[in-house]
Amino acid sequence: MSRYVSYRDFDWVLLGFVLIICGLGVMEIHSATVHTKFAGAHVKQIYWILAGVGMMFVVSLISYQALLDQIHWFYIAGVGSLMAVLLFGQRYLGAKRWVKMPGGNHFQPSEWVKIILILAVAKYFADMRQRELSWADFLKAGAIVGFPMLMVLAQPDLGTALTYVPIAIMGVFLGGLQWRQGLTVALLAAIGIGAVFFTPRVHVLKSYQKQRLTSFIDPELDPQGSGYQVEQSKIAVGSGGLWGGKGSQTHGAFLPVPQTDFIFAAFSEEHGFVGALGVLLLYFVVLMRLTQNAQTAPDRAGTFVVMGVVAVLSFHILVNVGMVVGFMPVTGIPLPLMSYGGSSVLFMFLALGMVMNVRMRRFVN
Amino acid sequence: MFGRDEKVSEIRLTAAQYIILAVFLVLGYGLWRLQVMQSDYYSSAAEKNRIRNVPVLAPRGKILDREGRTIVDNYPSFSALLMRDSSRDLLADADLIGQGLHIDPNEVRSRIRRSASLPQYQPIFLKEDITPDELQFIEAHRNELPELDTIMAHRRLYPRNGFMAHLIGYVGEVSEDMLNQPQFELYSAGDVVGISGVERQYNTLLMGQNGSRQALVDSHGREVGRRGETEAIPGKQLRLTVDIDLQIAAEEALAGKNGAIVAMDPHTGEILAMASGPTFDPNDFAVHVSRDQWNKLVTDPDKPLLNKAIQAQLAPGSTFKIIMSVAGWQEGIAQNMHVYCNGSATFYGRNSKCWVYFVHQTHGDVDLAKAIYQSCDVFFYTLADKLGINRIAKYATDLGLGQKTGIDLPQEASGLVPSEEWKLRNYRQKWYAGETIFVGIGQGAITVTPVQLLRAISAISMGGKLVTPHVADPSGLPANYVEAGHFTEVKNVSLDPAGWNYITDAMVKVLQPGGTSPLAAVPGIEIAGKTGSAQVVSLENRAKHKDNADLAQNGWFVGFTPRRNPDIVVCVLFQGGEHGKLAARLATQVIKAYVEKQRRTPQKMVEKPKSGTVDIGGLWTEPDTDGHKEKLQGGRFVLDLPKRPSALAVAAPGMQ
């Protein structure tokens, strides 16, 4: 049975839900910025979305299998771009995360490295020959993700570096993680985190990163700093009530950057529990639709690619919404599809392009 | 072993879905907890977040003269601000801003750089009290320079050139020191309060009560809307007892001199004029006094910030002889006393000279009257010796010397009346009879303030009625002020009518040929008075250093008119004026101005029509009723006083 790649197999339903979420995001960006110097950001966001959709269609046409065969080159290019950031990057607010592109735009390589890692991990596990994960597989998969992750940490950008972790976790989980391995790694991770936190000589985390994490545990410690953001976000969400409120937190600029990291808080304030839950439901539908696509993928590699996207998307939602409702520390991770920002939007559509790519080839051999 | 086409474990994919579901349930619970369970708590937290009370400043009350003419008013003043939360490149606009506001662009740039570490919402104050031209510049460049803005405040407008500066005082930001004092307990840092003079004394009355506006603010404290407002209660007007016309006469008499002139109604204690020289311009304090300016004022040896009328404590010189005469008369010593003055006399082994010694003359046979109008020192040395220091001190104290008069002005000095007890207490030494001799002519340890001397002579002129001097018109004051101020408190000093008649007769002769100051006489006006020349150093030393101006004597004159039932008492201190007769001329100028005005206006100077009020225009904004946009009003600056507007050439600083 052989069929040609056709847009009939394109996941139009998935795209529909994604665009609804994007639309809500654009609406909220407009509402949150209309009286600020960021007014008009929603128009830019629409351009990014249109560019993203276009890119998605283009990406869906290039066979993911062909991409996976060349993944080592992409991996080298990704690592190289991260190196370039460290060497020539633009320092902004104490971190080097961007490379200035011709034409004045700024490009954040750590975003596209996410796609490369998804593909690299998929490639690694698709080629794996045994059902159960060996410690060597485990370490190799860890190294594939860990190396670029350390480079992003050096920028420093803890938030983005953390988003690479679920790609590895999803890989090893689906690749055949055994209970003993899982427990061992969890234990080592716990000890590692404990060491970072409680040993003063280990300076892996910057002091502001530690502060964010400690103030998450007790917001009263730093009511004007990162604790302030957690508190203001909770006030915004809480004052939204069941049906939504006047949005005084958002419009009074009590919410920090309501168009990016705190867009869900802004949305929750203006549309209440009903609106916020609706958005969560949309995301859940998208994720379920994605896992469905993973199940119908033509091969192991396709499943890993789609599930890698699921892992990143879920992690973003968990950390961002968790932060907004006060369950998670402030890490500066945007909410995919809703938060304002070109790099984030392009990454999501690139990732969706890969998913479409897999889906369109479900009947192709 | 499985190949490339082997599928991923279905169980693990399903497990992943359940994990995602679990995550979403947890997030959903988080929303439920905040938005449904704790919604009320967070709603009120949001309310608190965005409403802030912004004070609405009450304009200070006007200060009027006794006829209702404005002395001190407010004017709306604008300050230019640079808002820093716009996304513009402020440094690039510095040239244009500097040009428009008449500031060095480099100064603008350095201020922008210096403020770089401040929070974004804090504006940079570029220039206070800008001119209409500069205001126009800002209005005209709203689009090009959106970061440039103005705020309005009521500022105090004082008469120019230091007119009445000491009496009125000035306002300034409340100091930390003042905030610790009980009378300022309701104030907070940044409030403008009276620092000296009437502004300080009647601060609570003039200040009114600040209102507050409930403003909707964002997290940067920027106002994004308005809610309710409790209006500010403007400060009450304060009517003074001072007559601007008389004040002008006093200031003109004192112009360029060092000293004080005080005029008072002896019936009531109402101060009609009070001048102190040299003076300062309180407008300099209304905006912002520069360090240089301040240093210059406080280090000036002529002490321009001191209100000498109530704060200078100096030897009264021969004017004290009137008090001596009263004491001598009341004790039954002076009326029949005759002394032969040959230029000097010896007391307690020391030769004490009369002032005539230095002009190579003698007084010859002297009785009390001649001793007064010729100011014979030898007579009063003798009288002092007979009275003794304690009896002198008693009469001086009874007439209000050596104690504050209770005038309603801050920081009054008390002067000093020496006595045996005083010396023992302060120096642990006994009083020497020789010291009494010099006190008898108003020298030695005795010091008075001009207002004390004025009050004492006023009491004598009224046959013993010792009034409380005051500058505020009690009829316009709230009851609690009147009680606290003791405006109408009168003490009666017993004074033998025959003695009063005799002494005031002699005082009239002071300004007649044969008296010490005949040239100060004003034809047609009967003035009783007494000159005084108080030594700074001994007369012998003074004779040796005739050219040293610092050693010049202080001239005094205190007098009243008419002799019977007087309307006005005037005291003049002319520091370095050398002769009492020069002080007398200054006093008679004021008296003349008073009498001439009386003749022009047959009734007492009350309730004139409202002519001559200060009408201040300029530029100001008025809040719109519905929004918080403000509308610019234009106007002209007019200050029209009926007489001598030149002395009151008032204009807001920087305004034309």
Image: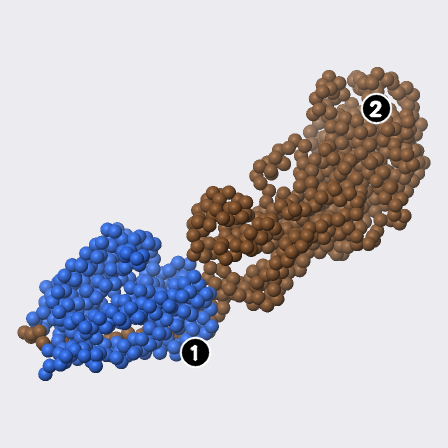
Quarter of the image for residue B276 reads top right
Q: Position of residue B534 (x, y in %)?
A: 77, 27
Q: Nearer the viewer, residue B408 or B566?
A: B566
Side of A179 relative to B435 (left or right): left
Q: Residue at the location (44% across, 67% down)?
A: A34
Q: Badge 2 is on which residue?
A: B377
> Is residue A198 rendered to the left or right of residue B352?
left
Q: Amino acid at mark 2?
A: Asp
Element at badge 1? loop
Q: The chain coloured blue carries which letter?
A: A
Asked if residue B302 shows in the view, the reply is yes
Three-letter amino acid code at the position of disc 1? Trp
| Residue depicted at 39% across the width and 63% down the height | A257
Subunit of label 2: B
The percent coordinates of residue A321 (x first, y second) are 33, 70
Q: Quadrant of the C terminus of chain A?
A: bottom left
Q: Nearer the viewer, residue B107 or B233?
A: B107
Task: Tell me if label 2 and label 1 are in contact, CB under 8 Å.
Answer: no
Chain that appears brown = B
The residue wearing badge 1 is A243
Where is residue A212 drawn, in percent x and y?
A: 34, 60
Residue A260 lies, in percent from the top left, at: 35, 65
